[in-house]
Image (tube, rainbow, N blue to C red):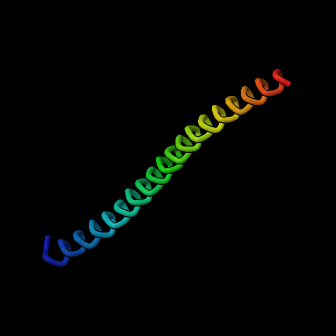
């Protein structure tokens, strides 16, 4: 191979590498977004459990108050 052919191979490999880096970056961004969504869903589930508990306690208090009337 002469120098020109080696340079062409290096350029070709560089372009392929850029494409692969773009694909990896895109996949990583999608994975991070999915994890963030799951984390947000988990946080919402926890807060909904707290809301559910608060509602049950309030209903219990109301039922107790009504039974005394």
Q: As drawn, is 61 to the left or to the right of 34?
A: right
Name which residue lies at 30% across and 63% down. Answer: 17
- Quadrant in which the C terminus appears: top right
Residue at the farthest left position: 2
Q: Which of 35 and 11 is in front in this view?
A: 35
Residue at the farthest top position: 67
Residue at the farthest front position: 69
Task: From the top left corner, tell me how far across and down residue 29 is, in percent.
Answer: 44, 57
What is the quadrant of residue 55 in the picture? top right
Q: Nearer the viewer, residue 4 or 39?
A: 39
Q: Nearer the viewer, residue 36 or 46?
A: 46
What is the quadrant of residue 41 in the picture? top right
Q: Is residue 55 above or below residue 37?
A: above
Q: As drawn, is 32 to the left or to the right of 53?
A: left
Residue at the farthest right position: 69
Task: From the top left corner, tell me how far across and down residue 18 is, in percent.
Answer: 33, 67
Name which residue lies at 49% across and 53% down. Answer: 33
Q: As drawn, is 1 to the left or to the right of 29?
A: left
Name which residue lies at 47% across and 47% down. Answer: 35
Q: In this view, does 44 lie above or below 57?
A: below
């Amino acid at each position: 191979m002469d120098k020109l052919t080696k340079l062409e191979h290096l350029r070709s490999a560089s372009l392929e590498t850029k494409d692969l880096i773009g694909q990896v970056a895109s996949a990583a961004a999608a994975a991070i977004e999915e994890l963030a969504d799951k984390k947000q869903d988990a946080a919402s589930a926890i807060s909904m459990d707290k809301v559910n508990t608060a509602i049950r306690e309030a209903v219990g208090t109301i039922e107790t108050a009504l039974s005394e009337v």
